[in-house]
Amino acid sequence: MLSRLMSGSSRSLEREYSCTVRLLDDSEYTCSLQRDAKGQYLFDLLCHHLNLLEKDYFGIRFVDPDKQRHWLEFTKSVVKQLRSQPPFTMCFRVKFYPTDPAALKEEITRYLVFLQIKRDLYHGRLLCKTSDAALLAAYILQAEIGDYDPGKHPEGYSSKFQFFPKHSEKLERKIAEIHKTELSGQTPATSELNFLRKAQTLETYGVDPHPCKDVSGNAAFLAFTPFGFVVLQGNKRVHFIKWNEVTKLKFEGKTFYLYEKKIILTYFAPTPEACKHLWKCGIENQAFYKLEKSSQVRTVSSSNLFFKGSRFRYSGRVAKEVMESSAKIKREPPEIHRAGLVPSRSCPSITHGPRLSSVPRTRRRAVHISIMEGLESLRDSAHSTPVRSSSHGDAFMPRGRSSRAESSERVAVIADENYSPADSVLPTPVAEHSLELMLLSRQINGAPCSIEEEKESEASTPSAAEVEALGGELRALCQGLGGSAGTQAEQVNKFVLSVLRLLLVTVGLLFVLLLLLIVLTESDLDIAFFRDIRQTPEFEQFHYQYFCPLRRWVACKIRSALSLLIDT
């Protein structure tokens, strides 16, 4: 039986698991992993495949069966981290955005960061003004289709490509104008470099938003950037704390705490797993950007004074070490095979990035993001449940707004107003190309009408729709009051629980101290304090009636156990 168990365990260790990683150019890298293969092994395979040396900025992301995102830990087994059934699917993404992407040593690294930021722009994570959006899109056009050619690029050619979740004809004309007049002669590498320099200046550069709620129940997005901790509410950055001002990060259940020199910020994540993921991301980002050397990295615990919590330690190099290592790279620049943009109206899919050379045990499949087909299927829902936009200045990317003429044609557009980052954040990286998730989430939550329709309804006479809308607002108000009451009840429960914990710890400490006092008193220590205690009648009674019989009983049990052990 022992041999069968050993053979079965050896077969389990030798079993290979199929693993597929989606790269930034939407191709796929497939390999086989053994059960005990660490995350570092898979990451090194990917970097070798990509011919990438400046690899510390990148990571591998996956989604567990509960739809919670995670970064693959390189010091742990891949199979044990992925609780789903094989074949495993993950994504290769930028984990730590470079503080100055234009200062990266190799062009291949800049190109991969360019692909990541282009994805951020398309999925609405990189927010900016309309003028900045047009310039960034023009840089993408110049990098991927080259100079403007009247023979190849007819009137309205920029409208055939999708750079943002939505955009208007005015924005398309602005993109084409910049591409024609300002960028002629720029090589792909130069355009990508200019793109990175412009993107770096935006407030939401490097933002990977985590949805949370503040103590008042208002929705917020927390993010970690190369420069510090950011809180976004609506379309405003309400908090920005530099890394050297963050003193501690902690979580307990769904509650996330950030300690600054003068204040403590408290936010509530949707689930305990999401809160732990937020905490680990914060620990890694703070270590990467703040510390001078990786030897300064310490194991961080989320526990309070009395109870042990989660422990985590960042295992990579820090930003300063990465820059110093990059400066020592001396090799011929690797060849980059860029793939140009495919017009989405002539061909319903758009491809991103290079077609990389193949290596053994690798299968590559171009994954096309079907943009126009997705928009066609979404226009009915977008028309029936228009997206709300609000104008609060020009700090962020414009949000879609349909005018009457455009609404009749059911064309998704971006207006000059700004929008909340909550409207364009996608829940999982595996389905980053799924635009349905954005509108579906708003439809489920009962998104209100656009600004124009709200103004028209206010100017018109009362109708059944207005009555229904008023009822919806009252229901929302009641829900908000109920939510605040629930939050207060949750805070009371936490306070009671903390008091009970403190009481249990106090009783435990007193019991331990009592046992220690008894042992020391019964010992042969010749100390005046213990001599005084031994001479009291109460101690003599305790000694002869309780301690001596207990000592004889324990000694008898020990002798019988030893005799049985000797006999066997």
Image (cartoon, helix red, strand yellow):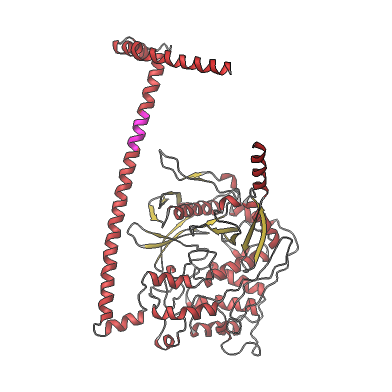
* Residue 3 vs residue 335, the one in the foreground: 3
Left or right: where does residue 467 sit relative to residue 190? left
Identify the image quadrant of the C terminus.
top right
Residue 303 occupies quadrant: top left
Residue at x 63%, y 61% (from the top left corner): 20
Point out the stretch of residues depicted in magenta: 502-509
Q: Residue furthest right?
A: 332
Image location of residue 363, percent across then percent down: 69, 65
| Above or below for 501 versus 442 | above
Residue at x 44%, y 76% (from the top left corner): 399
Identify the image quadrant of the N terminus.
top right
Number of numbered markers: 0
Image location of residue 45, percent across then percent down: 68, 57
Image location of residue 476, percent across then percent down: 29, 67
Left or right: where does residue 160 sit relative to residue 241? right
Does residue 317 appear anywhere in the picture? no
